[in-house]
């Protein structure tokens, strides 16, 4: 039976999730299907390798990705996508992940299913898109691209402003009211506190780049960029993380109570180790 009739690989952005769904459906529809039988199809010696991969305990090499695709009965395009998905999920750094993501977007089937992907990519990789979403909170906000372009720092083109408006409307982050005015669908947009997805990591890199640019382009009296280098225990490190979260929540509440907003600002938080953790001596 063709795997496409069981699960559609193009619906997935996690190859392990695809394998888990594939395995579950095959167990339901094919008598005698098991980890061992899959290993035989894939030409693997280990009878439990599929389970290790599904559980995240093992990765796939490019060669093994092709073997797994064949064992799943994927057609050529599905197999090519699966192999690219493996590369995307196992990318070692942000740049490699971006390259892999661009290769995924070349598949027409992927673009058809993940229709909002291009808009999400634009939102998280172009600093001015979330900035324009915040501009919509102004009482005198105008959706004229020239007006928008004239307000932002650094400057953008009216064409970029129009593209940003289209992106925000497509994602439902801006809505047009009965009076024709564009407004925010919700006062706040947060990235949550879970593991960073591809788009969210791209957003943070974009805003970090804007912070670096602000060192030269924004007068000192209009910015506050500072840093600390500390030596602390693991317990204090976790406490620092929690205090940053609390401060972030306080600032969100302060922004919600704002009566007459005038300017869009960007506030970044960064806390990361500069040395390896050493276990305390007994």
Image: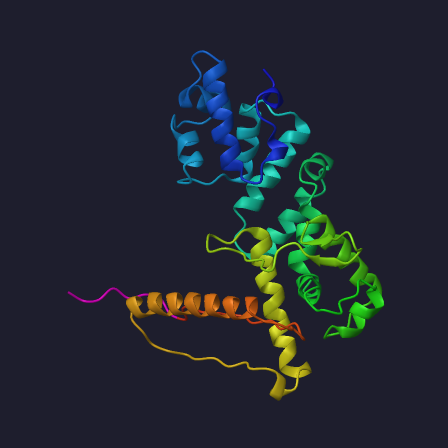
Residue at position x 72%, y 48% from top? 170
Secondary structure mostly seen in the magenta stretch: loop
By what rule are the colours in the image chosen?
rainbow
Across and down, in percent, residue 109 comes to 70, 34
Residue at position x 42%, y 13% from top? 32
**Position of 176 relative to 103 (above/below):** below
Residue at position x 52%, y 46% from top? 90
Residue 272 seen in render: no
Across and down, in percent, residue 237 comes to 34, 68
Does the magenta run of residues contain 64? no
Across and down, in percent, residue 22 comes to 51, 26
- Of residues 151 and 75, the one drawn nearer to the viewer in this rendering: 151
Give the left or right position of residue 229, taking residue 10 as reference: left
Across and down, in percent, residue 235 comes to 29, 67
**Position of 41 relative to 200 (above/below):** above
- Of residues 169 and 178, the one drawn nearer to the viewer in this rendering: 178
Quadrant placement of the N terminus: top right
Quadrant placement of the C terminus: bottom left
Q: Given the current orientation, which residue lies at the most extreme left position?
A: 282
Residue at position x 70%, y 67% from top? 135
Q: Given the current orientation, which residue lies at the most extreme bottom position?
A: 221
Residue 221, image quadrant: bottom right
Residue 137, image quadrant: bottom right
**Position of 260 relative to 185 (above/below):** below
Give the left or right position of residue 245, taking residue 87 as reference: left
Residue 44 seen in render: yes
**Position of 217 relative to 93 (above/below):** below
Does the magenta run of residues contain 278? yes
Task: Look at the image and give the residue range highlighted in magenta.
Answer: 275-282
- Of residues 143 and 82, the one drawn nearer to the viewer in this rendering: 143
Give the left or right position of residue 236, taking residue 149 as reference: left
């Amino acid at each position: 039976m063709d795997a496409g009739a069981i699960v559609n690989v193009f619906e997935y952005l996690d190859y392990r999730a695809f394998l888990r769904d594939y395995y579950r459906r095959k167990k339901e529809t094919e008598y005698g299907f098991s980890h061992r039988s899959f290993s035989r199809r894939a030409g693997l010696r280990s009878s439990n390798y599929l389970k290790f991969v599904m559980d995240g305990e093992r990765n796939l090499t490019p060669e093994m990705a092709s073997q797994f695709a064949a064992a799943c009965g994927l057609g050529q395009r599905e197999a090519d996508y699966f192999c690219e998905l493996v590369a995307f999920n196992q990318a070692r750094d942000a740049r490699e992940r971006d390259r892999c993501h661009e290769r995924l977007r070349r598949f027409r089937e992927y673009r058809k299913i993940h229709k909002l992907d291009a808009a999400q990519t634009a939102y998280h990789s172009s600093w001015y898109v979330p900035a324009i979403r915040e501009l919509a909170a102004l009482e005198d906000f105008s959706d004229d691209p020239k007006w928008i372009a004239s307000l932002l720092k650094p400057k953008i083109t009216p064409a970029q402003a129009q593209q940003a408006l289209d992106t925000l409307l497509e994602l439902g982050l801006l809505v047009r009211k009965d009076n024709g005015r564009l407004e925010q669908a919700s006062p706040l947009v947060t990235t949550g506190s879970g593991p960073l997805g591809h788009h969210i990591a791209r957003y943070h890199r974009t805003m970090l780049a804007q912070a670096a640019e602000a060192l030269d382009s924004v007068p000192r009296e209009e910015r506050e960029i500072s840093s600390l280098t500390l030596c602390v225990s693991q317990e204090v490190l976790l406490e620092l993380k929690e205090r940053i979260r609390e401060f972030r929540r306080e600032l969100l509440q302060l922004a919600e109570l704002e009566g007459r907003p005038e300017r869009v600002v960007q506030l970044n938080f960064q806390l990361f180790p500069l040395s390896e953790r050493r276990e305390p001596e007994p």
